Every structure is written in C-alpha cells, then in structure tokens.
Amino acid sequence: MQCSDSRERSTIFAMSSGQGRCGVAVIRVSGPASRDTLTCLTGRRAFPPARAAALRPLLDPRSGERLDMGLVLWFPGPRSFTGEDCCEFHVHGGSAVVSGVLQALGYLPGLRPAQAGEFTKRAFQNGKLDLTEVEGLGDLIHAETEAQRRQALRQMAGDLGHLYHDWSKRLTRCLAHTEAYIDFSEDDNIEEGVLDKVDNDVHVLQSEIDRHLHDSRQGERLRDGVHVTIVGAPNAGKSSLMNLICQKPTAIVSPIAGTTRDVLETALNIGGYPVLLSDTAGLRETSDLVEQEGVRRARERLQLADIVVVMVDATELPSDLTGMVQFLQDYLSEVMGASDEDADWIVVCNKTDLVLLEELNKLHLVVKDHGLPRMCLLSCTTGSGFDDFLRFLGEQVEKMCGNPLAGSPSLTQARHRLHLQNCSHALTQYHQQREMDLVLATEQLRTGLRQLGKITGTIGAEEILEVIFRDFCIGK
C-alpha cells in the first residue's frame, strides 16, 4: 500500500497518553500528511467526519495486517490543538498494540516521531497558545493538588496572558504616541497634551505592574510548593512530628540526641495545597564532624523556608511564666538569625504529656503580648493537640498560596517576575529621562514592551505602526 509523500513541513507522531499498560492509549499525528496517514491506516475506508469519533480497523500499511480495532478522529487545521491538520488513534493500551501502531506510522513517508513538547511547540508557533498558556498546560499536567489544578486551569484558559497582553497593548499605545510626537509634532498633526497623557498612562501601568509583583510570591509558592521546615534542639521531637504529619515512619526516631544528621524532605498535600516538609538535624554546638555538617544544612534549609516550625521540649522550660517567656525569646532570637525575614513561624511546645499544663496554658495566652509567634501545645506521643496544629499549619499554607480563583491571576513563574521587574525598571527610567531627552525616554518604553513580549512570546513592531496610523491618520 502506497501513500502520498508530503514535501511540506514534516508530520510528527507520538503517544499522547501516559506510558505503561492501560485500557486505552491515544496516539496523535500532526502535520500536512495527517489526512493521508489516517487514510492509510484505515485501509482507505470512508473518511470520518471532522471532530467525530469513528470505529475503524487499523491496518499495517506494508502488509495489510490488522493491528487493532480502535477509534479514529480527524481534526482539520486550524481547528486543532496544534493549528495543523491532526488525527488521533485511540487504541487498546497493551504495549504490543501501541508498538505495532507506532512502527506502522514510522514506515509512512513524511512522518517522524515527535520530539518532547513538539505538539505544544507547534501550537505556540501557530498562535493557538501563548507562552503563559503553554506554561499553564505544563503546570496542569504536573498538578498534584486541587489548588494547583485550579491555578493551572486558569492560566491555561488565558487569564494571565490576557492581563499581560492588555498591558502590552496599553504600552504599545504609549510608545506609538511618543514616537509620533517625535517624528510629526512639527507638522501640527499631533494633538496637544499627548505627552502628558502618555506620562499618566505609564504611571498607572507601572503601578499595576508593581502591585502584581508584590504578591508575596503566592502563585509561585502554589506552583512549586510551600517550604515548611521543622527545626529545634536535639530530641525536641522534630522527627516524631514529621512522622505524625506524614502518617508513616519517614524519619528515624530515637532517644539518642543527634540521630537526624541530614535534611529529610517529603512532598505532601495539606488541604489541597502543596507542601515540601523538611526535618532537620538538631541545632546545637557539637564536635562530631558529621553532625556539624547536618547542623550547617539545617541552617541552610532554614534560610529557604516559607514556614518554620520550631520544636520546643516542654520539659526544658522554666517553671515560672516569666522564665518561660524569656527562654522562648532567647531561643527564637538565636534560631531566627538564620531564617528568611519573610518566613512565618509556628512554635510547637512538645511533650506536654510530661508536664503540668497549667503554666503552659498561661504561656499559650500571653505569647502574642510578648511578640512571640503563635504557639501550639502538642504531645507527639499521645497525639494530643495534633489536630489543632495541623489545622493552623493548613491555614498558614493557604494564606501563603491564596485562592487561585479569586482576584487577578497570580505570577506563577520566576521568568515572569524577572521580565516584569525589568519592565517596571524601564518605566522608571522613562520618567527620569522624560524631561532630559524624549528620544532616550521613548527607548525605555520600547525596552519595557520587549520585556512584556518575552513573557507571552509576542515581540514585534507592526502593532506600533498600526497604532500610529490609526490614531493620528498621518500621511493622509
């Protein structure tokens, strides 16, 4: 069986569903030879209608042997995922079936296996997705919690891209008006007050960008996970708390001080939000070289934490309330010296089953008055107080990530943050250079526009020319 050989852009194919044995596997083909491919593998039977599933035998184009009986779908471009002609084969997911269909596709002229991400790359190149939507699709594929799914869906739907495109459109207008003023103001074709309006529009736009940047990294934390680090002195109960949170023996628990000598990290889902929980070596002075390295790593991880859980051994607290407050102030001051200033703190007073709770309950009520973080009373042995602690930890995590469906879409990528910071800096430079040299100031607007364009993947000059001639009718 011979099929027509397309001389145009290559046609690519790959398995689009997950790897491994499954009930149904989806194999996608995209490119100019997609129609011929579908015809070849179905034995030139009646061509299926667009975007409708049809049951067809799939045949080896060399021998005519039946490979499987499956569903086929035809997506003529540009109304397809990639914007090109596409077809899909939904086959049984056994490895022999999938391998047979892929081998058959590989023998057809004009077809080659797709590279990683190539279907999505073609969708971007054909204007079906901008870069923020591409990143949203990647985040959706890798989402492990409900909140991550909601944020990724919102970005994939274009909410973030629409925000950045709106800023680009407004900055394009400002740039076009300043360039028109420079080139044509002597011909009396420019309205009075054009530059004053540009100044005001740039100021408003910069304010919006700066507010977007000062979001406490909510979107990035939701995408990557909130870093929660458990710290404290040896034998305070750090590993026991980690095992309680994980509901399994993740860390070794021993009465011997200094058992944990490295950072133990595990990924968790707390209330629908992603958390990276770290157990660390006990903080103390030691002559043991291995333990010294563990303490160094603990302090290093402390600097990266979003939330720090400080474990305190209740049996080591002074008996009087004043002594307890002073002990905590001194201890937290020592630990906080190595932490991120933006981190949230939770003090967990462990081993409450071994002490009288009367004084501890008083301490629990006065910590805020003495500038101390929120305190949770807990016994890792009995589990008393654990539900209250976990609820409070979940509230802190949710506060750091925010509601992905509320308000304006959040920054999700460090790449976005960098380009927006560069754009804001360029707009600041515009205001500083505006009175000295309008040409140089205008170049700063161009720089800011390029930075916005790098986020969405749309960088060009045609839009500026279009605004100039539309708004000013120059050359009429």
Image (cartoon, rainbow, N blue to C red):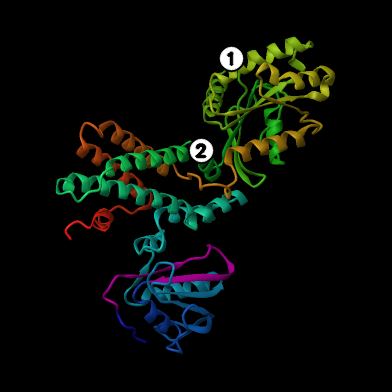
Identity of the residue furthest to the left in this view: 186
- In the image, residue 130 above or below residue 211: below
In the image, is 139 to the left or to the right of 174?
Answer: right
Which mark, by number, is residue 215?
Answer: 2
Q: Quadrant of residue 363?
A: top right
Task: Name the quarter where the N terminus is drawn.
Answer: bottom left
C-beta proximity under 8 Å, tags 1 and 2: no
Decide: few, some or many residues near mark 1? Use Cα within 10 Å; few <14, some 14-19, many ≥20: few
Verify whether residue 152 appears in magenta: no
Q: Splitting the image into 4 quarters, where does residue 349 fall?
A: top right
The amino acid pointed to by label 2 is Asp
Q: Amino acid at mark 1?
A: Glu
Magenta range: 6-30
Q: Residue at x 55, y 44 (%)?
A: 222
Residue 49 seen in this snapshot: yes
- Tell me which numbered mark, 1 or 2, is placed earlier along the sequence: 2
> Height in image: 318 above or below 432?
above
Judged left or right of residue 55, residue 238 is: right
Residue drawn at (50%, 79%) of the image: 72
275 or 438, which is in the foreground? 438
Q: Nearer the viewer, residue 406 or 124?
A: 406
Q: How many marks?
A: 2
The label on residue 285 is 1
Label 2 environment density (alpha carbons within 10 Å; few <14, some 14–19, many ≥20): some
Q: Residue 388: where, in percent of width, then height?
A: 76, 34
SS label for mark 1: loop
Residue 268 in picture, x, y percent from top left:
63, 43
Q: Residue at x 43, y 53 (%)?
A: 161
Q: Is residue 250 visible?
A: no
Rendered location of residue 362, percent (x, y) = 80, 18
Q: Does residue 110 lie above or below 236 as drawn?
A: below
